[in-house]
Image: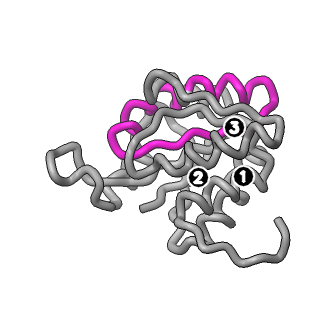
Amino acid sequence: MKNETNFWQGNVALAHGALAAGCRFFGGYPITPSSEIAEVMAEELPKLNGRFIQMEDEIAGIAAAIGASMTGKKSMTATSGPGFSLKQENLGLAYMAEIPLVVVDVMRGGPSTGLPTSISQQDVMQARWGTHGDHATIAYAPSSVQECYETAIKAFNMAERFRQPVLIMSD
């Protein structure tokens, strides 16, 4: 990226940080409030000879990202609260099989009428204790748009270094 100033939302910064880190595969399913990540990846990945696949559900999104990572592609998926719950079984598989990938959870309250698009930090405990097994978890919680960009890069580096999923928990 050139020396320029961009006025982005955190989700857009996360997506561009992932691209700068070398992410070339995104498998996901649109869910508010993480949808902008998928939108950026859908637009930008083809320009970089990468692949964006909108899957039929959240479970398939992480399964596709795991499969892409197993072929050597830097891969990512993004979701929000209820979708993060659905990803737990495959997330546990990725920990057990030492598969590097990045999972972004743009946390939200819910699921209840009138609340789903409000921000929250309700998934923080699930980030550590959501899956079965005894494994270390690397989870980042960026606190600014700049940190969203930088954290995406750091997450890919840590996933490769430690051969495991890395979580980005944003709100």
Colour mapping used in the image: one colour
Give the total of numbered labels.
3
Q: Where is residue 86 in the image (x, y as percent from the top left)?
A: 39, 30
Drawn side of residue 75 relative to residue 50, left or right: left
Drawn side of residue 9 relative to residue 163, left or right: left
Residue shown at 57%/39% (left/top)? 77
Identify which amino acid the numbered label 1 is placed on: Met
Residue shown at 16%/45% (left/top)? 112
Q: Earlier in the sequence, mark 3 or mark 2?
A: 3
Mark 3 residue element: strand
66 versus 125 height, above or below: above
Q: Do the residues labelled 3 and 2 touch (CB within 8 Å)?
A: no
Q: Are marks 2 and 1 in contact (CB under 8 Å)?
A: yes
Identify which amino acid the numbered label 2 is placed on: Ile
Q: Earlier in the sequence, mark 1 or mark 3?
A: 3
**Mark 2 — residue?**
138
Residue mark closest to the camera, 3 vs 2: 3
> Which numbered disc covers residue 75?
3
> Which numbered disc covers residue 158?
1
Residue shown at 71%/78% (left/top)? 5
Tell me the magenta residue range: 63-92
- Which sits in the foreground, 22 or 3? 3
Q: Does the magenta stretch include residue 97?
A: no
Q: Is the magenta stretch mostly helix, strand or loop?
A: helix
CA distance for labels 2 and 1: 8 Å
